[in-house]
Amino acid sequence: MWDPAVLTIGFALMIVAFAAYITGCVHQWTRHAPDRRTAFCEGYDVAAQALMAVVDSGRPMPPAVAPGPAPTVAFARGRYRGS
């Protein structure tokens, strides 16, 4: 039979270990969140600058796709499902 004192000590150790784990997770989250935000903003800025460089490079834009005939009412309502 298990001694209640042993169970109490074991349960207390489990609670302490869980609290330490949660504290570590919160610490890492608060420590790395600003770094992650900065990296995201810098990456977004680099991507936007690269896109603007492509747009401003003077290359002609590809021609737009010519629109086809308008779909029939039956097709637009989804009556034909295959083919």
Image (spheres, rainbow, N blue to C red):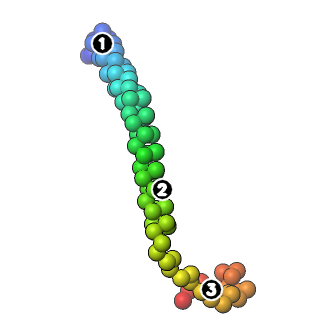
Q: Are marks 3 and 1 in contact (CB under 8 Å)?
A: no
**Badge 1: residue crowd in 10 Å (few <14, some 14–19, many ≥20):** few
Mark 2 or 3, which is nearer the eye?
Answer: 2
Q: Mark 3 falls on what kind of element?
A: loop
Name the amino acid type tagged 3: Pro
Badge 2 density bin: few <14, some 14–19, many ≥20, Cα 10 Å: few
Query: Which disc, if any, is residue 9?
Result: 1
Q: State whether residue 35 appears in this view.
A: yes
Instruction: Judge left or right: residue 76 versus residue 16.
Output: right
- The residue pinned by badge 3 equals 67
- The residue lying at 48 percent from left, 72 percent from top is 58
Q: Which numbered disc, 2 or 1, marks the residue that appears first in the sequence?
A: 1
The answer for how far apart the CA atoms under marks 2 and 1 are is 57 Å
Of callouts 3 and 1, which one flags the residue occurring earlier in the amino acid sequence?
1
Q: Which mark is residue 48?
A: 2
Which amino acid type is marked by label 1? Ile
Q: Nearer the viewer, residue 36 or 5?
A: 36
Tell me which amino acid carries mark 2: Ala
**Cα distance in 3D space between marks 3 and 1:** 75 Å
